[in-house]
Amino acid sequence: MEEFDLEGREFIELNNLLKITGQCPSGGMAKAVIAEGCVKVDGAVELRKRCKIRKGQVVEFEGRQVAVVAET
């Protein structure tokens, strides 16, 4: 499992997280795979493209897991 640091932000939108971590090559593709039900947040399918992902949550797509952390 890899980690993504919020770098002082309170949250990151799900579609942006998929794009920034390289799981999707574009924001449009990220939105599409979310709408298709291919992305899980904390083990449950998430269909909201702009869902706010906060510290402690885990996002899973195509067998790859990203844990969201907030280093200080």
Image (cartoon, grey):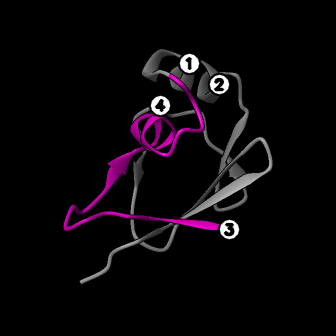
Which residue was labeled with disc 2? 33
| Drawn side of residue 39 relative to residue 48, left or right | right
Which residue was labeled with disc 3? 1
Task: Identify residue type, mark 4.
Answer: Lys
Which residue was labeled with disc 4? 49
Q: Where residue 29 sits: x, y (%)? A: 56, 18
For the record, the magenta segment spans 1-25
Does label 3 or label 4 sit earlier along the sequence? 3
Q: Which residue is drawn at 21% across and 61% down?
A: 9
Which residue was labeled with disc 1? 29
Q: Is 16 a magenta residue?
A: yes
Identify which residue, 45 or 60, lies in the foreground: 60
Task: Identify residue type, mark 2.
Answer: Val
Task: Identify residue type, mark 3.
Answer: Met
| Drawn side of residue 54 relative to residue 63, left or right | left
Q: Residue at x 48, y 74 (%)?
A: 56
Does label 4 or label 1 sit earlier along the sequence? 1
Q: Quadrant of residue 62?
A: top right
* Location of residue 14 with respect to 41 vertically, above or below: above
Q: Quadrant of residue 13?
A: top left
Q: Where residue 23 sits: x, y (%)? A: 60, 38
